[in-house]
Amino acid sequence: MAVQSVEIIEDKHVFGIVPFFLYFCYAKTDGGFCFDFTFIFHPPFQERPELLIFLNLKYINKIFMDFKIYKSHTEITDEVKSEVIDFLFNHLDQYRDNKEDIEKAIDFALGKSCDLGGYVLTGREGGEMVGVVVVNRTGMEGYIPENILVYIAVDNRFRGKGYGKMLMKEAINNAEGNVALHVEPDNPARYLYEKLGFTSKYLEMRYVKSR
């Protein structure tokens, strides 16, 4: 299995004057597998980080996720759609919406309720759904980003292991144009978004009319 690319996400000096560094990395192999791992190394390896993959292979936390993108309601079965709705409802925790609103966002992404569309991204490991992203296209650009990331959720058994970061990177890679998202100030996922390059440009305010 050959390594195609290595991306250093973040570095941090660990031991003061001792020249060792902690690196969080994301690597992609020619077999389509992704590795998300952490290692400590001495500066001579800074120029050749791929060497560390082989030196520390037994310490790598392997994540094998199969991604699938759904861009049309004709591409997704009723069974998978129900699975996605239930997954989001169960794993968004205190930030969840009701199932009716979740389904509306999915129908929008799949072009069922309007022509703007978007996509639904699922991540599975061993056939089991472990993460979902729903993106809606806005039909605008510039002052309002082309895409709104409406939902992202990871099975709570898999959190803190790099699955959320892999889902986000895959979602961003598949987006045509810029991406915006809404996140509550107390949501710990906010720090992941910031590491990936998201910034807080505005404070969102809403006025909800009584019906």
Image: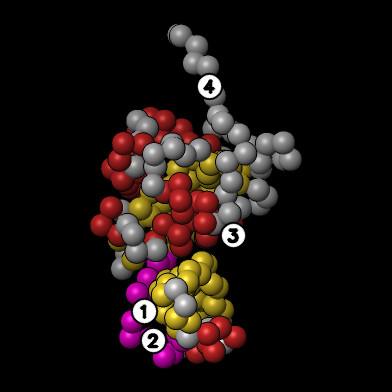
The residue at the point 34 percent across, 64 percent down is 161
**Residue drawn at x 47%, y 86% as measured from the top left:** 42
Looking at the picture, how far across and down is residue 6, in whole percent? 54, 77
Q: Amino acid at mark 1?
A: Ile
| Residue located beneath label 4 in the image | 206
Cα distance, mark 2 to mark 4?
Answer: 49 Å
Tag 4: amino acid: Arg
Residue 173, image x, y percentages: 59, 59
Q: Residues under labels 2 and 1: Cα distance?
A: 7 Å
Name the element at disc 4.
loop
Quarter the C terminus occupies = top left
Between circles 3 and 4, the one closer to the viewer is 4
Q: Is residue 66 above or below residue 102?
A: below
Q: Which residue is mark 1?
A: 60
| Whole-number angstrom distance, CA of label 3 to CA of label 4 | 30 Å
Magenta span includes 57: yes
Q: Earlier in the sequence, mark 1 or mark 4?
A: 1
N-term-proximal mark, 2 vs 3 = 2
Q: Please rate how many residues cluster around mark 2, counting C-alpha atoms within 10 Å: few if below 14, some from 14 to 19, many from 20.
A: few
Can residue 31 be seen at all in this image of the molecule? no
3D distance between C-alphas at marks 1 and 4: 44 Å
- Report x, y in % for residue 143: 72, 36
Q: Is residue 35 magenta?
A: no
Q: Earlier in the sequence, mark 3 or mark 4?
A: 3
Near-viewer residue (154 or 189):
189
Query: Which residue does the numbered mark 2 point to in the structure image?
Result: 56
Q: Residue furthest top?
A: 211
Contact check, label 2 and label 1, Cβ < 8 Å: yes
Disc 3 marks which residue?
A: 173
Q: Is residue 163 visible?
A: yes
Cβ–Cβ below 8 Å for labels 1 and 3?
no
Residue range corresponding to the magenta coloring: 52-66
